[in-house]
Image (tube, rainbow, N blue to C red):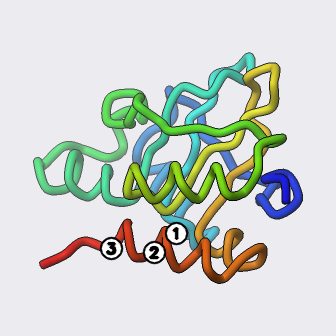
Amino acid sequence: MKIQEIMSSKVETISPDASTKVAARTMHDLHIGSLPVVSADGELMGIITDRDICCKVVATGRDAGWTKVHEVMRKDITTCFDDQEIDDAAELMASQHIRRLAILNRNNSMSGFLSVDDLARGSYDLAGTVLEASTPVH
């Protein structure tokens, strides 16, 4: 099964110049934990998560209204192509210990997002493998 068959193709994105306050409000309103950061020309630049805002802005006393997304986003985003097999995505997610994966088309434009929930719709076994690998051990 191809990634494009199960991924979420309607993905909310955010500009690198938006404030982290806007990013936090967007995530809160949409009940999501991350936003792909996309430039005006559609290039995927990184990702910002609720944890990034908590640890890099709030916990350090920075003003979320003035701190820009590009200042705290992660640029080392892991991606797959939408025409790859879901097994490839699950293996990558498990090896990188991540629960969300940005999906690109072959023009390197943002095509969608793949989460563990999406994987579960395609294969419970694959979703279980990713969850097991991405759950921190205390």
Q: Is residue 59 left or right of residue 8?
A: left
In the picture, the quarter occupied by the C terminus is bottom left
| Residue 80 in the image, given as x and y percentages of width and height | 65, 39
| Label 2 sits on residue | 131
Residue corresponding to mark 1: 28
Query: Which amino acid does the dot numbered 1 rest on?
Result: His
Instruction: Judge by depth and name the residue closer to the eye, 37 or 78.
Output: 78
- In the rendered image, which quarter contains the N terminus? bottom right
Give the spatial CA distance, label 1 vs label 3. Answer: 23 Å
Q: CA distance from mark 3 to mark 2?
A: 6 Å
* Nearest-to-viewer mark from 1 and 2: 2
Q: What kind of residue is marked 2?
A: Leu
In contact (CB < 8 Å): disc 1 and disc 2: no
Q: Is residue 101 left or right of residue 85?
A: left
Q: Earlier in the sequence, mark 1 or mark 2?
A: 1
Dot 2, how many residues are within 10 Å of its Cα: few (below 14), some (14-19), or many (20+)? some
State the image coordinates of residue 50 (x, y, percent, origin top left).
39, 59
Residue in the picture at 66% in, 83% down: 124
